[in-house]
Image (cartoon, rainbow, N blue to C red):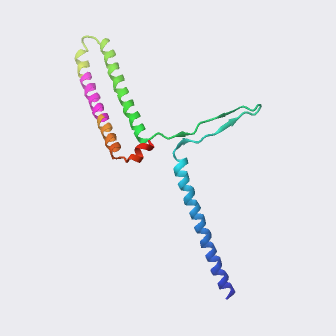
């Protein structure tokens, strides 16, 4: 009889402790998601051994999806411009005999550039559509 009563009390206490642990674990995860997961890397300090000098880094937030999309589209535009400039420089050094081959290559290259430009425009349009769907709160957070 005493064993049964003690076992029931022990089981009840285990359940209360498990609930407390779960409660605090959930709260800790919420705090991590709100403050820590937004950071690209955490702040840290490096101290010297011989004197009292030290260097501290900054806490840097991760870039938003909107900003990352804009950076990628900008890189794509730069690559397209660089490809165009390289083609112009290459044309100056070509011989007259190779003009026909170069024209075909240039046409192919222009088609590739057009395809890349269309892809970049489509990506920008998709990003704009995503931004239009965002709520006011999401836009303010960015």
Q: Nearer the viewer, residue 75 or 129?
A: 129
Q: Position of residue 82 (x, y in %)?
A: 36, 23
Residue 28, position in %: x, y? Answer: 57, 56
Q: Check residue 109 for magenta coloring.
A: yes
Q: Is residue 10 above or below residue 104?
A: below
Residue at horizontal 34%, vertical 26%?
80
Q: Which residues are magenta?
A: 105-120
Q: What x and y, as percent, mark residue 75?
A: 39, 30
Left or right, 117 with reference to 138: left
- Total labels: the figure holds 0
- Residue 66 quadrant: top left
Magenta segment, prevailing SS (helix, strand or loop): helix
Instruction: Using the image, determine if residue 51 lies above or below residue 66.
Output: above
Residue 119 or residue 107, whichever sits in front: 119
| Residue 52 point in image, percent of width and height | 75, 32
Image side of residue 79 versus residue 7, left or right: left
* Quarter of the figure with the C terminus: top left
Query: What residue do we see at 27% from left, 32% from top?
Result: 115
Q: Is residue 66 magenta?
A: no
Query: Which residue lies at the image location 53% right of the left edge and 55% below the top edge?
Result: 30
Please tell me which residue lies in front, 102 or 61: 61
Q: Is residue 130 above or below residue 81?
A: below
Quadrant (top left/top right/bottom left/bottom right) for the N terminus: bottom right
The residue that appears at 32% across and 19% down in the rendered structure is 87
């Amino acid at each position: 009889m005493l064993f049964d009563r003690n076992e029931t009390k022990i089981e009840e206490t285990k359940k209360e402790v498990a609930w407390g642990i779960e409660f605090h674990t959930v709260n800790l995860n919420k705090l991590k998601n709100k403050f820590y997961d937004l950071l690209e890397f955490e702040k840290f300090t490096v101290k010297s051994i011989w004197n009292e000098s030290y260097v501290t880094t900054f806490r840097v937030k991760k870039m938003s999806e909107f900003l990352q999309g804009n950076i990628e589209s900008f890189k794509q535009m730069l690559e397209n411009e660089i490809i165009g400039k390289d083609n112009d420089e290459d044309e100056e050094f070509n011989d007259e005999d190779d003009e026909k081959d170069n024209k075909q290559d240039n046409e192919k290259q222009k088609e590739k550039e057009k395809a890349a430009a269309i892809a970049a425009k489509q990506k920008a349009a998709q990003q704009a559509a995503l931004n239009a769907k965002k709520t006011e709160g999401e836009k303010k957070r960015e």
